[in-house]
Image (cartoon, rainbow, N blue to C red):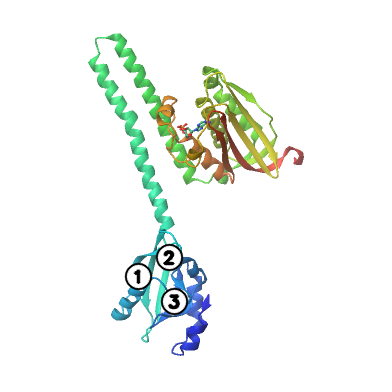
Amino acid sequence: MRFRKDASDLDERIEIPELLIKTLSSLESESLLTLPGEVIVFESDGLANFGIVRDGRIVSEELIALIRVVRRTGEIHRGAIEIARGPIGEGKREVTVSVTPLTEDGLILVLVSDESEGRRIDAVRRDFVANVSHELKTPIGALGLLSEAILGAKNQPEEVVRFATKMQNEAKRLTELVQEIIDLSRLQSSDPLQKAFPVEIEDVIREATSQAQISAESRGIYIEPGAIASATVIGDRDQLIAAVHNLIENAINYSPENTKVSVASSAKDGLAEISVTDQGIGIAESELGRIFERFYRVDPARSRETGGNGLGLSIVKHVALNHGGDVKVWSKEGVGSTFTIILPIAKTEEQI
Ligand code: ADP
């Protein structure tokens, strides 16, 4: 909370009750009190972050205009104003203000809150729904076309078999996609640590590797067990296995046949790391920032061939974050990639 010294020197017209100041300081919104002539007599601590007031003066023309309207009409006004994010650049943010006349002699209360974060989350949610609908339409459309093709070819048994096989593939993709969308929304809406148990990372790696064995063999890829450190983390075993499994499947899918994928773990400074390294196609540096986004694929055509839907890495990221950890990636085009899940250790073997 800050009283403007210059204001109280200049202006003896008003005494602000302590209770009002305490109330304003306890609100989530930032606040300021101003007298006619836009003399600020109080501003809350966090108001400085909004760039509305500089050197004791209101610098937002829009807010000044709103305050003048309130003085003229004596009525409360609420609205959104745009303020510059900084002194340079065009970045703007929208804040919500409510301007209330408090006393006859022109004391005005301004409450300021930033709803842009809430709006950003809403936008991400809307995008997700739009993306899901788009992703679902593709296999559903394909199923429709294939069933028409089967009807058209009903007297040619070989064609029927060919189209029916394609239909099976599309149905399988659709099932996987729907399952991953469900998994992802579960991950986003629940806190896994509420039903968390001690999990051995060795066990997670063993299980995830064994689940990937068949697809590795079908592509002649050898899953090499690297150095494995023992460590226990607190979390949801199935989610952790699914995350490591996703990384191994990606390593297999984005590597040429007859190469190696290695899975290793280490434990130090209270953190366990599980890393999956491949000798695959790698990822361009410019793409690395985006691959964890939902539905993002570097090469949609290739990803579609391998049954990818762009959700795998966002699931990995969510699992890591929900467990208080993170995921990082190193990659070089034509050389390969290493994805590492980092998790806080509950206890190491030595401590048990
Ligand atoms: P997808 O289902 O398409 O594999 P992911 O979310 O798992 O989706 O991965 C996003 C994109 O990141 C992939 O489409 C691919 O372009 C890239 N990618 C992921 N893992 C690897 C890897 N090990 N090597 C090369 N590219 C990868």
Mark 3 Cα-neighbour bin, 10 Å: few <14, some 14–19, many ≥20: few
Query: Residue beneath label 1, please?
Result: 62
Q: Callout 2, which amino acid?
A: Ser
Residue 85, quarter of the rendered image = bottom left
Name which residue type carries label 3: Arg
Q: Where is residue 30 in the image (x, y as percent from the top left)?
A: 46, 69
Mark 1 vs mark 2: in front? 1
- Contact between marks 3 and 1 (CB within 8 A): the answer is no
Q: Do the residues labelled 1 and 2 touch (CB within 8 Å)?
A: no
Residue 123 in the image: state x and y as whole percent: 38, 50
Residue 176 x/y as whole percent = 43, 30
Q: Distance between the residues labelled 2 and 3?
A: 19 Å
The dot on residue 140 is none
Decide if residue 54 is on the left or right side of residue 227.
left
| The residue at label 3 has a CB less than 8 Å from ligand 1 | no
Query: Which element is circle 3 on?
Result: strand
In the image, what residue type sits under mark 1? Answer: Glu
Q: Is label 2 in a helix, a strand or a loop?
A: strand
Residue of label 3: 57
Q: Which mark is residue 113?
A: 2
Secondary element at image label 1? helix
